[in-house]
Every structure is written in C-alpha cells, then in structure tokens.
Amino acid sequence: MSDPNQGFQPPVPAIPPTPELQRQRPAKLMWAGVALVVLGIIIAVAGIAGFITGGIQTGLAVCALGILFVGFSFMRLPSIPGAPPPMSTMQTLTGIFFEPTNVFRNLRAHPRWLTAILIIGILSGAYTVAFWRRLTPERIINYTVDKLEEGVLKPPPEALAKMRTQGVEEAKAPTFQAGMVVKAVVTAFFGVAFIAALCLLGVLAFGGRMHYWQTFAVTAYVAFPVTVIQKVISLVILFIKSPDDVHPILHQDNLVFDNLAVLVASKDHPVLFVLASTIGILSFYRLWLSATGLREGGYKVSSSAGWGVAITLFVLFLLLGLAVATLFGSFFG
C-alpha cells in the first residue's frame, strides 16, 4: 500500500532577519535633543526676562537643534557587511586633509559627524565675533542701516533708528556675542543637514544608492577642511589688515582671496563679482571633495553620479548667489 504522505514536504524554516533589518537607531540623540530643548527654553525665558541679551534668539536656535536631534534619533544607521574597524576621531579629522578617499570609505560604514560639525560651527562663530569686535558694531550696523534706507523696501524710520541705538548696544554685550557662536554651531548642523538631503536626492536621481547618514557624514567632512582653511587664514588676515580695508558685509564670511573676485569691483559689478568668486582654489577643492565623498561614502555611487551631483549643487548655489547679488547689489558697495 502506498504512503498517502509521500509527496509531503516539511515547511521551510523561517529565515532569520538579516543584519540590514536589525540596524540600530542612534538612541542617544533622543536624550541629547530633549536636553537641548530644555536648555533652549531656559535660555529663551532668561532672554525674555532680560537676564541674557539676545537670549530669545539663542534659546530658539538651541531648541531647534534639539528638535533636529530628536528627529535624527528615529533614523536607523546603515549596515555594511564586513565593515572595516572605525577610524578614531583624530584619524578622521587629520586624514580628511591627507587621505580623504580612505576617510570617506570608512565613513560609509561608520558615519561620524559630530566633532567635525562642532569645529565648523565654533570656528565660524569665533570668526564672526572677532570680525564684529575688529570692525566695531557701530560701523557694521550703521552701514547696514544706511543700505536699508537706500533700498526700495526699507523698514519704517523708527525701526531703523532702533537698530542704530539698541542694536549697537546689544551687539556689544558678551552674552550676545556668545550667542553668535551658539547660533553659528546650530547653523552648521542645519546647513549640513540641508545639503546632505540635497545630495541624497541627487544621488538617487543619478541612479545611485546611499543612506542619509552617509550623505550627512560626507557633507560634514567635505565642509570641514574647507572651513578650517578659510576661517584660520581669515582670522590671521583680519588682524593684519586695516579695518578700513575690510568690507562690513562681504567679508563677514571670510577674508580668503583665492578666486577671480579680486579682479572685479563688487560695488560696480555685484553679479560678476559673485560669479568670479566661485572660480577659485577652495571652490574647486570643495567640488572635488564632494564628488569623491559621494562616490566613496555610499552603498553604490558611480564616479559620474558623484560628479553629477557635485556639479549640479555647485550650479544651484551659484544661481542662488547670482539672484541675491541681483536683488541686494547695493549692499556690495
């Protein structure tokens, strides 16, 4: 008699989840974000009460950074099978100057970014504070108000008068200047986050595959060496050069003259000045770092995709700069 269960096949055992499905979340960012929100509220309340000059804006900036961290805590980290051991923070910070390809490859599996962005923000804030002290708040604010008065959409006279008096007094306060550094750090985090999102969209549009944490780390370490070079050299030039030869608006970002803008008068040709400022050593260095970082820092990004995204973003920000020069060319005078 034949076996009625002759064709029976035992069920295939369930395949355990792959490491890709078990990726961890950066849970520590949740607690850091909550702490920043609480700290920001305290600073803002102290600003409202008049204990901290400029505390309202600084407190709101810290709260915004906390909210960003909380949102980031829900994003799972990438998973790379057979990943190499992570570089130390010092190896990453120094290696990005001498062996960027190796650093970006390591960031693919270990997307670190905190120290790089903190240094970017602190250096930017330190330069801003030094710039305001060197040129004095009176000169910077009065120049800005004069240009606003010449504009088509100028604020009411009482608002401009308040800027000249109250604005100068606030800018001299130590807590206000400390707030400049804090806001520069917050701006660095949000700037990296925004550009990383654009890079991720660009990589996907060019047929590549990349995780947001990878683009975030790559963007941070593309900006890091460029910012360090710019700010350090700018700080040296700021104290060597006469304050009368420093523009109160155009030079608030940096004083490095490594591009063709030195051949163009910003007052007479603001649009051409912005266009010429993009043709320089650091601009091309950043462009090359961006293409290299995207190629080496993602799951699957070809060289053409990396360069395509880098050039596309370069052109987009150039167009934005030209638009600003067209609308606010009077500030270049």
Image: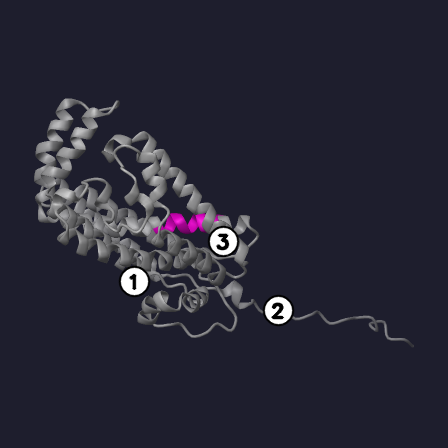
Does the segment drawn in magenta span residue 24?
Answer: no
Q: Secondary structure at mark 1?
A: helix
**Which residue is at a point 84% across and 73% down the rendered structure image?**
6
Give the image location of residue 114, x and y in percent. 32, 61
CA separation, marks 3 and 2? 39 Å
| Residue 51 versus residue 164 in the image, above or below | below
Magenta highlight range: 192-201
Tag 1 residue: 115
Give the image location of residue 257, x and y in percent. 27, 50
What is the quadrant of residue 224 in the picture?
bottom left
Nearer the observer: mark 1 or 3; the answer is 3
Tag 2 residue: 15
Estimate how packed mark 2 is, as few (under 14), some (14 to 19) or many (20 or more) residues with alpha carbons within 10 Å.
few
- Left or right relative to 271: residue 255: left
Q: Nearer the viewer, residue 302 or 121?
A: 302
Tag 3 residue: 307
Give the image location of residue 11, x and y in percent. 71, 69
Does the segment drawn in magenta span residue 195?
Answer: yes
Q: Amino acid at mark 1?
A: Thr
Q: Amino acid at mark 2?
A: Ile
Give the image location of residue 325, x and y in percent. 32, 34
Which quarter of the figure is the C terminus placed in? top left
Please identify the dominant SS of the magenta region: helix
**Which residue is at a point 28% across and 48% down the rendered structure image?**
187
Answer with mark 3 or mark 2, whichever residue precedes in sequence: 2
Q: Is residue 76 visible?
A: no
